[in-house]
Image: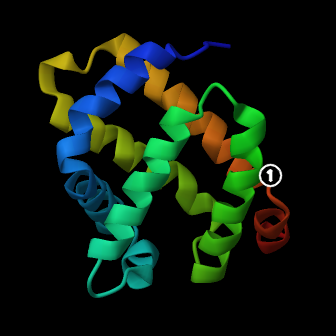
Amino acid sequence: MHTPDLHRIRASFAWFSPCGPALIAQAVRLAADRDDDIRSLLPENQEHLNTLLFRTLGHIVKHADNFALLEAQMATVASRAAKAGVRPKQLPLMRDSLLAALGALAGEQWTPALARDWETLLDAIMGTMLAAPSVTRQAA
């Protein structure tokens, strides 16, 4: 398994920070354009949601070297997402949309290695969310 280069991820996160909520808005739009069910879950005003999701992403990046901490926290995020109507099958689409938005914003700096690092990190987070008891019950 590829181990993500956290230095590369953290450096790139710093590039994205000035426009973080806008980055999330773009990713959410991409996901909603591909899945009508995702679109139906979105509030009319997404500003607060975009800010919250970018803060969560920042927390993940900051603590990516302490996965035990993140596992418990991502279980809480997964529970809240499940209560809001997010289904497990939508998580890969949301991950892919975030990767596309990150790549578009990074431009030429979005190298294959950086893309692989982010994908590995997001896959690990998605895995912890899918393993959360509330999500496991919802998928059954």
On the picture, is 111 further left or further right than 138? Answer: left
| Count of residue discs | 1
Q: 92 or 21: nearer the eye?
A: 21
Residue drawn at point x = 80 percent, y = 69 percent:
134
Q: Secondary structure at mark 1?
A: helix
The quadrant the N terminus occupies is top right
When the figure is inspected, residue 65 is found, relative to residue 39, above or below; the finding is: above
Quick one: which residue is furthest to the left in this view? 108
On the picture, is 82 further left or further right than 56? Answer: right
Residue 25 at x, y percent in the picture: 26, 61
Residue drawn at point x = 82 percent, y = 63 percent:
136
Residue drawn at point x = 14 percent, y = 26 percent:
107
Q: Quadrant of residue 48?
A: bottom left
On the picture, is 95 further left or further right than 28? Answer: right
Residue drawn at point x = 41 percent, y = 23 percent:
9
Q: Is residue 23 at all visible to an observer of this figure?
A: yes
Q: 12 or 136: nearer the eye?
A: 12
Chosen colour scheme: rainbow
The quadrant the C terminus occupies is bottom right
Q: Is residue 103 at all visible to an observer of this figure?
A: no
Q: Which residue type does callout 1 highlight?
A: Ala
When the figure is inspected, residue 65 is found, relative to residue 78, above or below; the finding is: above
Residue 123 at x, y percent in the picture: 59, 36
Q: Which residue is denoted by mark 1 in the rendering? A: 131
Residue 39 at x, y percent in the picture: 36, 77
Residue 117 at x, y percent in the picture: 47, 20
Mark 1 closeness class: few <14, some 14–19, many ≥20 residues within 10 Å:
some
